[in-house]
Amino acid sequence: MAALHRAVELADRGAGTVLPNPVVGCVLLDPDGRTVGEGWHQRAGGPHAEVVALAAAGEAARGATAVVTLEPCNHTGRTGPCRQALLDAGVTRVLVAVRDPWPTAGGGIAALRAAGVTVLDLPELAAGGDPAAVSVVSAAEEVNRVWLAAVRRGRPWVTLKAGITLDGRVAAADGTSRWITSPPSRADVHVLRAAVDTIMAGVGTVLADDPLLTVRDDAGRPSVRQPLRVVVDSTGRTPAAARVRDTGESAAGAATWIATAQEVGAGADGRVDLVGLLTELGRRDRRHVLLEGGPTLAAAALDAGLVDEMWLYVAPIALGAGPSVLQGGRVGTLTQAHRGELIDVARFGPDVRLRYRFETTSLGDPVGPPGPGVSDSMI
């Protein structure tokens, strides 16, 4: 299974550049098990991983085994079907780590088998308890988690990001928050921003901080590719001069959507229906939302079962007062607490980045009635 783990490594190179498409890696092995070609999907509209690997292999692809992280596509979009490319190249065996859940592109396994190609469907082996299959299927699912979750659920993967103090504050009592975290942490945030296709913030954050919400380099220059900026603004309070509305040179043409309750729909509290908003983003082919603030919006998304991952940049300072990373949530007792799984710990300068994974729901069912003192100032 070493070739499949290598294919997963290759797939990961496309993270952040292929959206709204999946990341995919492919390794071609000759009959003696030697690698004759490798490839990964590098950008939406570009050659798929199988086509890149086949080009690298040339004639050595005839009689080879293709090891792929995702079922070869079976349709013609901006590129032709990878199923046909494999057949034309003379590949005789294919190992598939994950089946394609998108009905439009699915069916590659069946089509290859119908054409006489031997296909090893690893999810079948994993379902039977084969430990090696379970390992590679899990790795292939993880590297492609954003796209797979978005397609299966009909809404984007949501990453909640916050820079906090040791006591969980995102600002001081007087509202100052620049800068809680260090330059290395802020640089890593821009790496994260570059890997998503949507950045979301509440109108309270826009009113308090007037953020630009763009991807920038260390010198402050905007990147060529910019995510869609979404402001969750129930009543349309975003100022006309707000920097998040800037689509000029300083924002590299980044687009902005001011999402109001009138346009998206409102929940029982009269605020923007977050489930409806994410569903609409899914319809617009948005796969990965980075939720940047504020505390009320973050708590509402967590309560609605919409947060898949939480990235916390913890600075070695304590305030003792000021707004917390989550405010106005619905959890009223410990048994209702949202429990995450620690995925990764990394250090950036004096700060520590903690990554947690959460179990989410497709419908965003709330955990209970609103708690006392819920404010709508952030949404």
Image: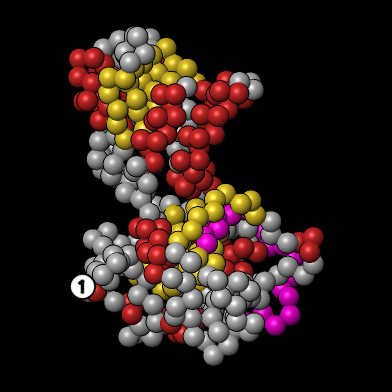
Looking at the picture, tell me which residue is in the foreground, 295 or 312.
312
Q: How many marks?
A: 1
Residue position for label 1: 249
Q: What stretch is highlighted in magenta?
A: 352-375
Q: Does residue 355 belong to the magenta stretch?
A: yes
Give the residue displayed 46% in from the left and 41% down from the top.
143
Relative horizontal placement of residue 173, taking residue 86 as reference (left or right): right
Element carrying mark 1: helix
Task: Residue 336: name its quadrant.
Answer: bottom right
Relative to 166, say whether 126 is above or below: above
Q: Which residue is drawn at 65% across and 54% down?
A: 340
Please, which residue is most extreme toward the bottom here?
Answer: 174
How far across and down, in percent of the image, does residue 338 sit? 69, 59
Q: Does the magenta stretch include residue 349?
A: no
Judge left or right: residue 187 versus residue 265. left
Residue 291 spot, x, y in % from top left: 49, 65
Q: Which colour scheme is used?
A: secondary structure
- Looking at the image, the residue that sits furthest to the front is 350
Q: In this view, does 173 lie to the left or right of 193?
A: right
Give the quarter of the image for residue 198. bottom left
Inspect the image, locate mark 1, and give the three-letter code of the amino acid beneath it.
Glu
Residue 199 visible to the viewer: no
- The quarter of the picture where residue 114 lies is top left
Residue at 36% in and 20% down: 66
